[in-house]
Image (spheres, rainbow, N blue to C red):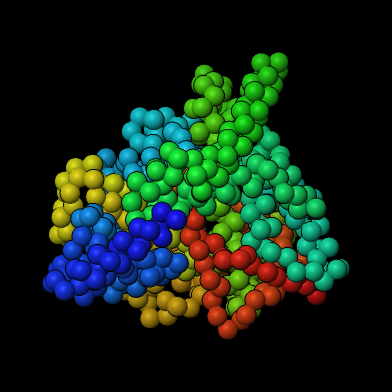
Amino acid sequence: MLVELSFLITIFLSFFFIFFKTTSNTDSSPKSYPLIGSFLAYYTNRHRLTQWTSYYVRNSPTLTILLRRPFGQIRVITGNPQIVQHILKNQFSMYQKGDIFHNTLYDLLGDGIFNVDGDEWKFQRQVSSHEFNTKSLRHFVEHVVDSELNERLIPILKSAVVNDTTLDLQDILQRFAFDNICRIAFGYDPKYLAPSLPKAQFAIAFEDAVIISSERFRMISPLLWKLKRFLNIGSEKRLKEAVSEIRQFATKILNEKKQELSSNSSSIQSVDLLSRFLSSGHSDEKFVTDIVISFILAGRDTTSAAMTWFFWLIYKNPDIESKIVNEINAKSDSPIYDEVKDMVYTHASLCESMRLYPPVPVDSKIANVDDVLPDGTAVKKGTMVSYHPYAMGRVEKFWGKDWKEFRPERWLEKDETMEKVKFVARDPYIYPVFQAGPRICLGKDMAFLQMKRVVAGVLQQFKVVSAIDDSSEPVFITNLTMKMKDGFPVKIKERK
């Protein structure tokens, strides 16, 4: 109701100001009016903000635009690699998560690693980094991912073949990732991918909390969601209930883990993240659960989103699917960890998929001092500066005239012996899908290993056939991560 009222007020104001000269605009930035900025265009495109901003970024000579928000607020949005490197590396200390993000996501993430800066962030990252060494990654693939794959995912796909049922693959993959990350974060198996596909309260509450927290960013002013929270009405009431459910569950697991560690000292060697933080001497309930909830958010949404778009793209490109299957069959006799680690063409295919559909299409930092960006754009303290991986993956200058094509070969080159191909990574500031600089994603290697193991396990036995209209791209929505609207319905066919 409040959003609708604010929109009507804005419309009234816009008719008043339309008779005045608009504020200065470049051809590559959305049209802006006094007081309301670009709100009219923003509101019109609210259901496709990623594509809308991508269009302007890609058509800007500097790959940078200014989005003028109501009441004089300005947001810088860029696809310029020099600026991306500037904010993520060269001037890292000047561009932080900041109060806007911290306050908006605090109810869900608290002071977890993805919502803090400075010493708090450094400590959490240092302790968390032990979760991603070679020994832990091998254990993750061989025990966590492989058991979830063979004991749950594969049987569900086999059942779909036998019964000719339609599955929402997006939901299935999100359940898969949720079980995996809970086992890594908590040392707890929620069994969300059980054959009955249960409606686990914790998982449902988590999804609600993510969606509502995302919606806060799209409101014309944070005062709207803060007022709703104060009055405890609408979406903010639902968020409060969802977060309460999440915290109660996390506290229960935390207390059980404390008991486990105190009764059996050998359990301290457990590989789960919760055990590591408790063993480091930090037993404060809120502190530890904030960290673990942040990792569940990252591990649940990003990998499942990436795999969903990947399976749609290979369905649309059967020749690439054949090459992936050939590689899988050639590696099938190798140990599990070595198999997935050495799948070069599959790795390239996943990178290419995330170029076109990055799990996090836009990310932002806040300038904590006045600054001038490499292209000359002046930035005042408190300005939001966003880099746009979705737009950057569509810039002809970076990827060539065939940028629209799904072509894994762009990531490969022949080695000196000419007997095989090798993977060649791109500049992380041109391809910032996993961020870059000091905050580069800790779970990058884990994500690739998980995705490649799933791809190998699924495609060796099955063909995934889209059950949606082939003539158009699935509609995507962005709730912190990029997902397909209404899911990804598929038929599963046995591979002959």
Q: Could you tell me which quadrant the N terminus lies in?
A: bottom left
Is 177 on the left-hand or right-hand side of 376? right
Task: Between residue 111 and residue 41, name the one nearer to us.
Answer: 41
Task: Between residue 255 and residue 414, name the one nearer to us.
Answer: 255
Q: Residue furthest right?
A: 162
Task: Between residue 421 and residue 73, name the one nearer to us.
Answer: 73
**Residue at figure coordinates x 60%, y 78% from the top left:** 316
Vertical arrangement, residue 52 with respect to residue 429, above or below: below
Residue 402: x and y in percent read 42, 80
Q: How many marks?
A: 0
Vertical arrangement, residue 288 with respect to residue 97, above or below: above
Residue 483: x and y in percent read 54, 62
State the image quarter where residue 490 is shown: bottom right
Is 168 on the left-hand or right-hand side of 38? right
Is 293 on the left-hand or right-hand side of 460? left
**Residue at figure coordinates x 38%, y 81% from the top left:** 401
**Residue at figure coordinates x 49%, y 40% from the top left:** 232
State the image quarter where residue 21 is shown: bottom left
Q: Is residue 331 visible?
A: no
Vertical arrangement, residue 495 with respect to residue 66, above or below: below
State the image quarter where residue 131 is shown: top right
Vertical arrangement, residue 207 with respect to residue 276, above or below: below
**Residue at figure coordinates x 51%, y 49% from the top left:** 235
Residue 338: x and y in percent read 64, 52
Q: Is residue 453 visible?
A: yes
Residue 219: x and y in percent read 38, 55
Q: Could you tell me which quadrant the C terminus lies in?
A: bottom right
